[in-house]
């Protein structure tokens, strides 16, 4: 940080006013919550998702009085990513923030998974982050911020989700490396590692794990309850904004203490 910059925290330091934030996986869950929170703090939002539900998320951004641009495509399609980045450049010029949230998984013992399934997990959870970041960094000015959404599984064993958790660990490592490589451009790179906040699809996964896996996760976070996706969105807004101006290369756990607790959990 330049010593001449006044970093005194002020109420306006939390504002994202007149900035553009790109959010992938924005149709539901954490991505949708991030898009809504960014708009509430003054940002325009470019929302990306393969689900048509992303249009409803964009309507929520517009209801906040902010502009929204929508890309309905799969982030694994590198050509579509490049085309959308070009569209954003033409419509907005520059961006301030990028939130790599898109990802997904399925439950399968490592030896039962197919090469095709593995390739899908690698592409959706790691390669897409690389492609999206490369496409949008050229649109960022100094002061830009990238936030990658990993998972608590990046830091602990995840039986039944071996390749998925390995890719999330890869994103966490990518975060640290890009924090150094992009520092000369004035771009900060951080991650959040959420857990303990049910999102669409989690109920089916939890039921499958409960029925078929010999391993079970802690029943609830040590905090004592689950949290909505908005809990993660608040941390993302912090990392996008000026209050986090000297934070880079970090991963913030947003998990109610699950990572800290290891296998310990409250008695039911």
Image (spheres, helix red, strand yellow):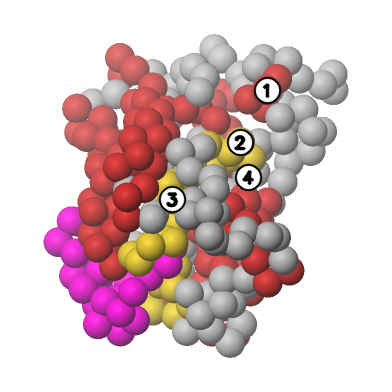
Q: CA distance from mark 1 to mark 2?
A: 9 Å
Q: CA distance from mark 3 to mark 1?
A: 25 Å
Q: Residue at x 43, y 50 (%)?
A: 188
- Residue 79 included in the magenta stretch of the image: yes
Quadrant for the C terminus, please.
top right
First to last magenta residue range:
71-98
Per the image, the residue denoted by label 2 is 253
Per the image, the residue denoted by label 3 is 188
Q: Are marks 1 and 2 in contact (CB under 8 Å)?
A: yes
Precedes in sequence: disc 3 or disc 1: 3
Q: Are marks 2 and 4 in contact (CB under 8 Å)?
A: no
Q: Residue at x 42, y 47 (%)?
A: 189
Q: CA distance from mark 1 to mark 4?
A: 19 Å
Callout 4: helix, strand or loop?
Answer: loop
Q: Which mark is residue 260?
A: 1
Quadrant in the picture for residue 113: top left
User: Residue 178 appears at what percent x and percent y?
Assistant: 33, 42
Precedes in sequence: disc 1 or disc 4: 4
Q: Would residue 47 appear left or right of 253 to someone viewing this image?
A: left
Q: CA distance from mark 3 to mark 2?
A: 18 Å
User: Residue 222 appears at what percent x and percent y?
Assistant: 77, 27
Q: Relative to 60, does residue 158 appear above or below in the rendering?
A: above
Q: Nearer the viewer, mark 3 or mark 2?
A: 3
Q: Is residue 64 visible?
A: yes
Per the image, the residue denoted by label 4 is 198
Callout 3: helix, strand or loop?
Answer: strand
Q: Residues within 10 Å of mark 1 (few under 14, many from 20)?
A: few
Q: Are marks 3 and 4 in contact (CB under 8 Å)?
A: no
Precedes in sequence: disc 3 or disc 4: 3
Callout 1: helix, strand or loop?
Answer: helix
Precedes in sequence: disc 2 or disc 4: 4
């Amino acid at each position: 940080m330049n010593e001449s910059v006044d970093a005194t925290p002020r109420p306006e330091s939390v504002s994202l006013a007149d900035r553009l934030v790109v959010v992938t996986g924005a149709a539901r869950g954490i991505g949708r919550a991030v898009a809504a929170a960014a708009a509430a703090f003054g940002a325009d939002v470019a929302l990306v998702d393969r689900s048509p539900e992303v249009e409803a998320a964009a309507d929520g951004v517009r209801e906040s009085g902010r502009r929204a641009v929508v890309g309905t495509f799969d982030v694994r399609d590198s050509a579509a990513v490049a085309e959308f980045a070009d569209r954003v450049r033409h419509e907005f010029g520059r961006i301030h923030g990028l939130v790599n949230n898109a990802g997904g998984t399925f439950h399968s013992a490592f030896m039962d998974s197919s090469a095709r399934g593995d390739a899908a997990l690698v592409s959706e959870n790691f390669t897409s982050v690389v492609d999206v970041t490369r496409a949008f960094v050229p649109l960022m000015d100094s002061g830009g911020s990238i936030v990658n959404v990993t998972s608590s599984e990046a830091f602990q064993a995840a039986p039944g989700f071996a390749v998925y958790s390995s890719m999330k660990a890869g994103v966490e490592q990518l975060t640290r490396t890009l924090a150094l490589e992009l520092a000369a451009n004035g771009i900060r790179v951080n991650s959040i590692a959420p857990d303990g906040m049910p999102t669409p699809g989690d109920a089916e996964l939890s039921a499958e794990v409960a029925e078929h896996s010999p391993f079970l996760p802690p029943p609830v976070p040590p905090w004592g309850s689950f949290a909505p996706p908005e809990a993660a969105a608040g941390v993302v807004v912090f990392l996008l904004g000026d209050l986090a101006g000297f934070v880079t290369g970090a991963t913030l756990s947003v998990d109610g203490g699950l990572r800290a607790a290891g296998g310990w959990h409250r008695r039911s």
